[in-house]
Image: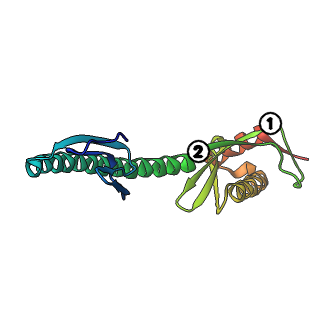
Amino acid sequence: MKPISRGNLTFVGRFGEPSEFQTTPGWAQCSPVTPFQVEHTVPAEGWEDAAKQVLGNLARIVHTRTQTELKLVALNARVKCLESALDDVRNRAAVVVPIQSIAPEPFELLQPIQAVVQQSGEDHIASFLDANMNASGETQEEALANLKDVIIGSFEALEAIADRLGPGPKSQLAVLREFLKKG
């Protein structure tokens, strides 16, 4: 802040938050603390018109700043909305999980089974696409465990009636035989 002479009144300050006024004989200062500053010297005579001009300028500055802050609030809300949508997309993305073991079942994996796990509503679905098999669960782990059960159950059921299978189940059994054998 700079001192002012007795003949003039100078407004120096940054506007927008509560201010503290300090006056001493012959001196007057306004020094609030916020991000923008206005400085204007008013002559001792005709101060009313000059004060109106200063207040008009201040009103424009406050209006502009308010509009800018409103735009920032709206942009911030949109960013949060987009971040939330991105999190939803990330959470729903499919994940490939290699199944490396069927233990403790009496079966041996000949090669890892590539299971695709994705969220569907509040559940998860695990799929063994090569054999056209799916299972669901409340978590990814539960869906994978259920898929292992479906694979084992289907393999045992199809093996038991292998000589009577139609083309679809016969193809499914052929795929399962590429991945599993009874131990």
- Tell me the element at label 1: loop
Closer-to-camera residue (98/133): 98
Q: How many marks?
A: 2
Mark 2 or mark 1: name the one nearer the start of the chain: 2
Q: Residues within 10 Å of mark 2 (few under 14, many from 20)?
A: some
Q: Amino acid at mark 1?
A: Gln
* Relative vertical location of residue 54 with respect to residue 120 in this rendering, above or below: above
Judged from the image, the secondary structure of the residue bearing numbered disc 2 is loop
Q: On the image, numbered disc 1 is attached to which residue?
A: 111
Where residue 49 appears, as percent x and y from the top left, is 8, 48
Image side of residue 26 versus residue 162, left or right: left
Q: Amino acid at mark 2?
A: Ala
| Residue 110 percent location from the top left of the image | 83, 37
User: Residue at (71%, 45%) from the top-left corner?
Assistant: 173
Q: Which quadrant is home to the N terminus?
A: top left
Q: Residue 172 appears at what percent x and percent y?
A: 67, 45
> Compared to 78, does 149 lie above or below?
below
Q: Which quarter of the picture shows residue 105? A: bottom right
Q: Pinpoint residue 97: horizontal percent, then vertical percent.
A: 70, 43
- Residue on which disc 2 sits: 94
Q: In front: mark 2 or mark 1?
A: 2
Which residue sits at x=34%, y=55%?
23
